[in-house]
Image: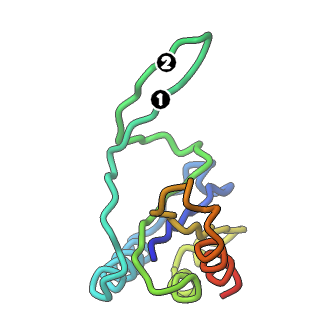
Amino acid sequence: MRFMIIVKSNQQCEDGMTPDDSFMAEMAKYNDDLAKAGVLLEPDLKGARVRFSGGKSTVIDGPFAETKELVGGFWIWNVKSKREAIEWVKRCPIPKLGGEVEIEIREVLEDDPMVAAIPQLRERRRAAVRE
């Protein structure tokens, strides 16, 4: 199962706080542990945004240096269950920065959304949410 792990922006991020070298080393080790366990899938860190205004769209290419964003960062992980994803998130050093931190876990549904009407698939998804 694949999950997107979303680190929500918080006040420290909004204020432009820069973590110290010790924290950055701890995060590097955490990411290395995720990679060694085969959990971490590498996202495209550059990305792009499409902004819509006045009926027009504007494409903005990353990487994005602006810290005042709703999402502070994210990972894509390949794990056996939501429970395993939760256990990995509990090991994350980000809360050591202080303040309130929220990390969201969302399953990446790889099946065709039209298939969601099939009862077996719905039950599998319900079971995964209950884990």
Circle number at residue 57? 2
**Disc 1, SS:** strand
The amino acid marked with disc number 2 is: Ser
Q: Which mark is residue 116?
A: none
Gap in Å between the C-alphas at discs 2 and 1?
A: 6 Å
Q: Residue at x 45, y 68 (%)?
A: 20
Asked which quadrant contains residue 107, the reply is bottom right
Q: In the rendering, at what x and y percent does residue 42 appear? A: 30, 64
The quarter in which the N terminus is drawn is: bottom left
Q: Residue furthest front?
A: 118
**Left or right of 98 in this view: 59:** left
Residue at (45, 63) in percent of width and height? 110
Residue assigned mark 1 = 50
Task: Tell me if residue 8 comes above or below residue 3 in the rendering.
Answer: above
SS of the residue under disc 2: strand
What residue is shown at x 44% (from left), y 66% (from top)? 75
Q: Nearer the viewer, residue 4 or 17?
A: 4
Q: Position of residue 50 (x, y in %)?
A: 47, 29
Indicate how the structure is coloured in the image: rainbow
Going 53% across and 12% down the picture, which residue do you hit?
56
- Counting from the top left corner in percent of width and height, residue 92 is at 52, 80
CB under 8 Å between discs 2 and 1: yes
What amino acid is found at the position of numbered circle 1 in the picture?
A: Val
Residue toward you, 104 or 119: 119
Image position of 122 (left or right of 28): right
Upstream in sequence: badge 2 or badge 1: 1
